[in-house]
Structures are given as structure tokens and as C-alpha cells.
Amino acid sequence: MTQEGSHFQFFQYLESFNLVYIKLEIFLCLDYKSLHKARQVCKDWNDFIKEEIWSSRPFHTRRLLSECWRQSDNEPLYRVIECPNDLGFYLAVNNKTLGLGTKNYKTLVLNPSSGDSLGTLEMNSLDAVIDELIPDPNVHDEEAHDVQLDVNDQIIVTVAGSGLVAVWDRRTLRLLYSSCPHGLDNVLGVRVIGDFMVTGGSHGSIAAFSIISVASHSTPVVKEECNMNRVHRAISHIDSDGTRVLVGTERELVLWDFSERAAPQIQSRVRSGQVCCCVMSFPHAFCTGLFLNYGVQVWDMEKQEKIRHIHTDLSMWVLTIKNNILATSMSVLRDEEMEEESLVSPSIFIHDIPELVDLRVKTEMLWVKELKCPIEQFSDPHIALNTTSLFAVTKNAEQGSKIHVWDFWNY
């Protein structure tokens, strides 16, 4: 009898006595590298691991992924996606879709694993919506065509400096909704999670939407739930977990409760100083402030207390969260007369969120992984995370954009 045949007989023997749980316990003892090798043995093992471990036990899978990010001997695989004809501005990603918002009113939709193009979202085609509000196109500022975005399994949301908000079907890239809920204000925040979407205008307005799946339609319907005008002096960034919305302003972090989407209430607020970017993992919030407010602050929004402040000597820009991982990228101060060769490559730092919010862990003992992002003139890296990879975009006026990818799950 072959060795392979003995494997099959062993597991069939367990199943014949209704002892399949022993088979599960064996596979649950394996690390992620061994699980990957086990999937190559035969179709039965592959199907069993995919169904009983990856799909049915998300907490176990999340723990394995967390170990993968943290292991010091696991160097990520580095690759580059070239986007030569477009100046990339903003990234959003999940495990199926990578979106690159540009500075020319377009969003490039890519496969995050291969980098292959899946299509382009043209907000230029929606100019008629803006023309109704702005008869004179010269009113637009230099950020009018900058596109920010977010993506989930159903939709892609793109927002622009001109005030336009557009929602697209993720699979077909068909337009589902377009409007200017913030008037002519630059839209500086966008988040979609589950069936909830929220956008923030630069002059302090917040618009919230529900993404409704209708049985008679193959695509979802976008319904505006509320539009609060000028509830803040200004908004620089927002984040949400689907129930709450975290708002960053020029002086504070504000946590809104959107349990009742048509009638949200302020839950708490803290004096953080200037906020450039903010993210949340309730009850904790994280924020950066560029050169006006160095480092990354960590706040307990329930207790309204700052519990940690890291990278206090650096100008930090973007924050992004996925599961238990937080990543943050630097902004490099530039002088117009500075030679490109003398520019310092900005760092991207990866942290473990449970550790960051655990006051028993001293700041100097925190685990951190530092990646150096290749420098581009006049470009700091905007970053995004999915469950297995970190993405960073840099732009060069002469060469277009590059998306730098570090794959931590290499198996």
C-alpha cells in the first residue's frame, strides 16, 4: 500500500466511526505554512481545510494571519504594479478589488493579486451633475479632480474634490448613484462597511446612506438616510465601523452614534489637536496630524482618554486598519530646492492593535515592523491593507504611478 493510500485510509477510518473531529483537531494544530503544504496533498485535504478551517473558523484564521504578519523570519514578498499613464492619489482595497483614485477624476480598478486591470470608473462622464450646480468650471480648485474611494464586496464609492459622490456596482462597474450631497465642498472622507456608507465634506457636513439589497434587482439601491449640514467647523477625515462614525477635525476627534441612521447623536469627543487621518477599532481611535501634530495618538473614546502616543518625532500621514493590524505612513518634508537624491524614503510602520491598546505593554516594548517605501518626487505614500497584503502608491509627474505591494501571506 502506498504512503498516500495510508493517509486516505486513516482519515476514512476516523470518519467511519464518526470521529471526524479528530481529523479537525489535527489540522487545527498546524501553522499556516504546514496548512498550505497539507492542501497540496489531495483534493480531500484541500477541500476540508478550506471549508472547516478557512471558512468556518474565522477567529482561528485571523490568529494565523496575525502570526504571519508578525513573524520576524517571514519577509514579505515585494512586487510593483505599474500605472504609467495616471497620477495615483488614493488607495482602497479588499481581497477582491484594488481601487486607485487618481488626480484626473478617474478610478483604476485592479485585481489586487495580479495587478490586472478590471476597468476604469470615469467621473468625467458625470460632469452634467456638477454643471447643474456650478455653471462656471473655473470655480473648481486644484483638488477638484482628486478622487478618494472605498470598496466592499457590493460597491465602490468614489468622491471628488468637486463635491461629487458616485456609487458603482463592484462586479459590473455600473453606476448606481451620483449626487453632490455636500454641495461644492471638497469631500474629504468616505467609508462603506456592510450596508452603511458615510461621507464627510470639508466644511463640516456629514451624509449617511444605506445600501439596500432588493430581491427584484441584481444590484443594490443607495438610499440617503440623513444629511447634516455644517455640524463641524471642518472635517479632515472620517472612519466608521457600520454603527459609529469617527470624525477628525482641525482640533478634535468626535465619535457619532449612527444606530439610528436618520437621527445620529454625538457619543463622545476628545481634544486631539489637528487631525489629518483617523481610524477606529471601537472603543479605540487612532489619529495623525502631519507636521502640525506629530506622531500617532491612541485614544479610548469611551473614557475620553489618550492612552498612547507613538512616533512622536515623525510627521505621520495615513492610517489604515485590517483586523488586528494597523499601518501608518510618513510624510516627508520637502524643500523646492532640495535635490531628489537627498530626499529620505518615507517609512511605513505596522503595529499590532491589541498590543497598542494594552497599557501593560510599555511603548518601547511594542512590536513594530518598518518598511521603506521608494521615494518619488513630490509624493508621499498613500497606503491600504487587505487581510494578506499592504499596498502603497507613489506618483511621479513624468512617469505616472507605482503601486508597491508587500505580500505577507506567501504560500
Image: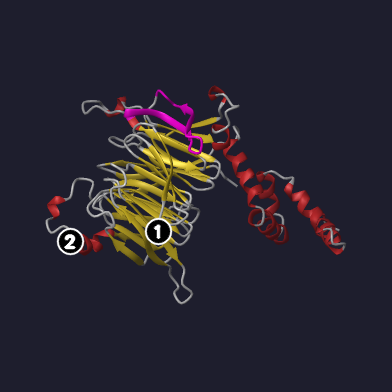
Say which element carries label 2: helix
Out of 157 and 398, give the one closest to the viewer: 157
Query: Could you tell me residue 137's position as x and y percent?
Result: 14, 55
Callout 2 touching callout 1 (CB < 8 Å): no
Tell whether 229 sits left or right of 352. Answer: left
Badge 1: few (under 14), some or many (20 or more) residues near its Cα, within 10 Å? some
Mark yes or no: residue 406 visible. Answer: no
Which residues, given as a range, are shown in magenta? 291-313
Magenta stretch encompasses residue 309:
yes
Indicate which disc residue 262 carries. 1
Q: Quadrant of residue 13?
A: bottom right
- State which mark lies toward you, 2 or 1: 1
Query: Could you tell me residue 165's position as x and y percent?
Result: 31, 57
Q: Quadrant of residue 21?
A: bottom right
Magenta stretch encompasses residue 299:
yes
Magenta: main secondary structure equals strand
Out of 396 and 179, give the one closest to the viewer: 179
Identify the residue at horizontal 29%, vertical 60% (top origin): 122
Tell whether 397 sits left or right of 57. Answer: left
Query: Could you tell me residue 125's position as x and y percent?
Result: 25, 63
Query: Could you tell me residue 6's position as x and y percent?
Result: 84, 56
The first of marks 2 and 1 along the sequence is 2
Identify the residue at horizontal 44%, vertical 74% (top origin): 217
Image quadrant for the N terminus? bottom right
Out of 147 and 131, give the one closest to the viewer: 131
Indicate which disc residue 131 carries. 2
